[in-house]
Image (cartoon, rainbow, N blue to C red):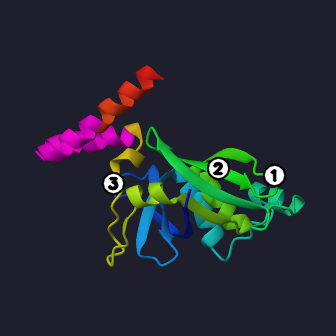
């Protein structure tokens, strides 16, 4: 299993959808990128940590990292290994004993940011999910298999409203696939 090291590029808001944001990650050469959907609370958490005027050392993630000094890139890393029901699956990998702790993807990125852990994605997943980095910073492609059900339904309604039936068909197929997977599982 090969893996691609990722850089956290930043947080982007979704136009017209203030309750969601995108955590943007790129490969080390910054030629391809992925976007991970996060909620507005996680957007706020990243905002706190990018505002130089705000002291975050007493916030829970920072406190936990300070009382457990082994949470460093020497002992831990984050690995994204799949997408299931519109969400990337992340693992906190203990490099000493190879134990794996599942985490919400956005929490894993925040922990990596705070503890300066390395972020990785399985190579096949990255190749399948990533898009070329756009020279235009105001546009970002997001694979439909990474959208939440709510976002898929809104996008389907909008595609139908705009008579974009090809996109509506793809969105409907994704919704049907998830419904089928949910009923089988």
Q: CA distance from mark 3 to mark 2?
A: 31 Å
Q: Quadrant of the N terminus?
A: bottom right
Provide residue 132's location: percent of width, then percent of height. 35, 70
What residue sits 52% from the left and 52% below the top? 40
Provide residue 27's location: percent of width, then percent of height. 49, 71
Provide residue 154's location: percent of width, then percent of height. 30, 41
What residue sits 45% from the left and 51% below the top? 20
Q: Main secondary structure of the magenta part?
A: helix
Question: Residue at label 3?
Answer: 16
How many numbered circles are shown?
3
Q: Is residue 64 left or right of residue 36?
A: right
Residue positioned most to the front: 1
Numbered circle sitting on residue 106 = none
| Local secondary structure at mark 1 | loop
Residue 166 included in the magenta stretch of the image: yes
Do the numbered discs 3 and 2 sit on residues whose CB atoms are within 8 Å? no
Question: Residue at label 2?
Answer: 91
Q: Which of the two discs, 3 and 2, sits closer to the camera?
A: 2
Q: Which of the two discs, 1 and 2, sits closer to the camera?
A: 1
Q: Is residue 89 left or right of residue 37?
A: right
Q: CA distance from mark 1 to mark 2?
A: 14 Å
Badge 1: few (under 14), some or many (20 or more) residues near its Cα, within 10 Å? Answer: few
Numbered circle sitting on residue 97 = 1
Q: Give the magenta part as a residue range.
A: 150-173
Q: Nearer the viewer, residue 48 or 99?
A: 99
Provide residue 158's location: percent of width, then percent of height. 22, 44
Badge 3: few (under 14), some or many (20 or more) residues near its Cα, within 10 Å? Answer: few
| Local secondary structure at mark 3 | loop
Establish if 80 lies above or below 102: below
């Amino acid at each position: 299993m090969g893996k691609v090291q990722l850089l956290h590029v930043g947080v982007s808001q979704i136009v017209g959808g203030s309750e969601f944001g995108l955590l943007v990650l790129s490969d080390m050469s910054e030629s391809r990128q992925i976007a991970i959907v996060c909620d507005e609370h996680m957007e706020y958490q990243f905002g706190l940590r990018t505002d130089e005027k705000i002291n975050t050392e007493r916030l829970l993630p920072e406190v936990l990292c300070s009382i457990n000094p082994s949470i460093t890139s020497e002992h831990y890393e984050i690995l994204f290994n799949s997408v299931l029901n519109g969400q990337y699956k992340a693992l906190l990998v203990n490099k000493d004993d190879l134990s794996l702790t599942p985490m919400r993807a956005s929490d894993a990125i925040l922990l990596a940011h705070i503890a300066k852990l390395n972020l990785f994605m399985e190579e096949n997943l990255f190749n399948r999910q990533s898009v070329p980095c756009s020279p235009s910073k105001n546009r970002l492609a997001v694979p439909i298999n990474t959208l939440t059900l709510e976002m898929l339904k809104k996008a389907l309604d909008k595609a139908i409203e705009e008579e974009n039936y090809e996109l509506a068909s793809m969105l409907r197929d994704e919704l049907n696939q998830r419904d089928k997977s949910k009923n089988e599982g």
